[in-house]
């Protein structure tokens, strides 16, 4: 506890250590709309063999981080091995509809699914702002078909996060 004087009053402030903050993650699993997966896949294939990215839009519901929409980062161009998301893409992703940027997805066309050292560093920075933030990596050109995984960073390592599919009744 830290005490500080503000205009003759003493205010007590709590201190949260970095390790405690990282334990503030509310969600244990990702729930992703199947239509969103299709949109991501189509966007990534359209830009292959270059890497591309989307921002994942959703919200926390119980223990799930629910992903219901995306923002395609159409102004962020990548090479065969990297992509940089322009900061302006985050502003464009805000549609005032109750959904928020809860993560990002980027492609590794033909490279398999993994978190590179750069991916891990970027993910760790986002998690300092929003501990529930996830990173999805997809290989849209995988020899065995579409392949993707969700990750968070714990310590300095990428940890795979489990996910379920959200299917609407009208889709079944």
Image: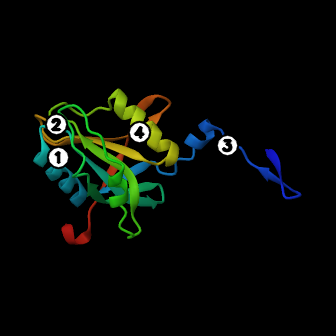
- Toward the right, the furthest residue is 8
Q: Which residue was labeled with disc 4?
A: 123
The answer to which of marks 1 and 3 sits earlier in the sequence is 3
120 left or right, relative to 146: right
Q: Mark 4: which secondary structure? A: helix
The alpha-carbon separation of the residues under discs 4 and 2 comes to 20 Å
Q: CA distance from mark 1 to mark 3?
A: 39 Å
Position of 132 with respect to 82 (left or right) is right
- Give the left or right position of residue 76, taking residue 128 as reference: left
**Residue 60 appears in the rendering:** yes
Q: Earlier in the sequence, mark 4 or mark 1?
A: 1
Kindly indicate the quadrant of the structure image that contains residue 122: top left
Q: Which residue is mark 2?
A: 109
Frontmost residue, 160 versus 49? 49
Tell me where residue 104 appears, x and y as whole percent: 33, 47
How far apart are labels 3 and 2 at the CA level?
A: 40 Å
Identify the residue under disc 1. 44
Q: Quadrant of the N terminus?
A: top right
Residue found 45% across the figure and 61% down from its top: 61
Q: Are marks 4 and 2 in contact (CB under 8 Å)?
A: no
The percent position of residue 15, horizontal first and vertical second, equals 71, 43
User: What residue is rendered at 50% in x and 30% in y?
Assistant: 155
């Amino acid at each position: 506890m830290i005490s500080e004087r503000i205009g003759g009053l003493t205010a007590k402030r709590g201190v949260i250590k970095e390790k405690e903050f990282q334990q503030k993650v509310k969600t244990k699993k990702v729930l992703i709309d199947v239509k969103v997966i299709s949109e991501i896949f189509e966007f990534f294939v359209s830009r292959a063999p270059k890497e591309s990215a989307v921002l994942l839009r959703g919200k926390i519901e119980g223990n799930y981080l629910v992903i219901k929409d995306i923002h395609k980062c159409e102004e962020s161009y990548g090479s065969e091995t990297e992509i940089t998301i322009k900061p302006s893409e985050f502003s464009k992703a805000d549609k005032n509809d109750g959904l928020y940027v809860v993560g990002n997805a980027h492609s590794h066309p033909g490279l398999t699914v993994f978190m590179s050292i750069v991916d891990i560093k970027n993910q760790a920075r986002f998690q300092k702002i929003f501990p529930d933030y996830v990173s999805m990596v997809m290989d849209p050109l995988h020899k065995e078909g579409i392949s993707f995984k969700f990750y968070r960073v714990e310590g300095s390592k990428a940890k795979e996060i489990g996910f379920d599919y959200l299917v609407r009744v009208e889709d079944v």
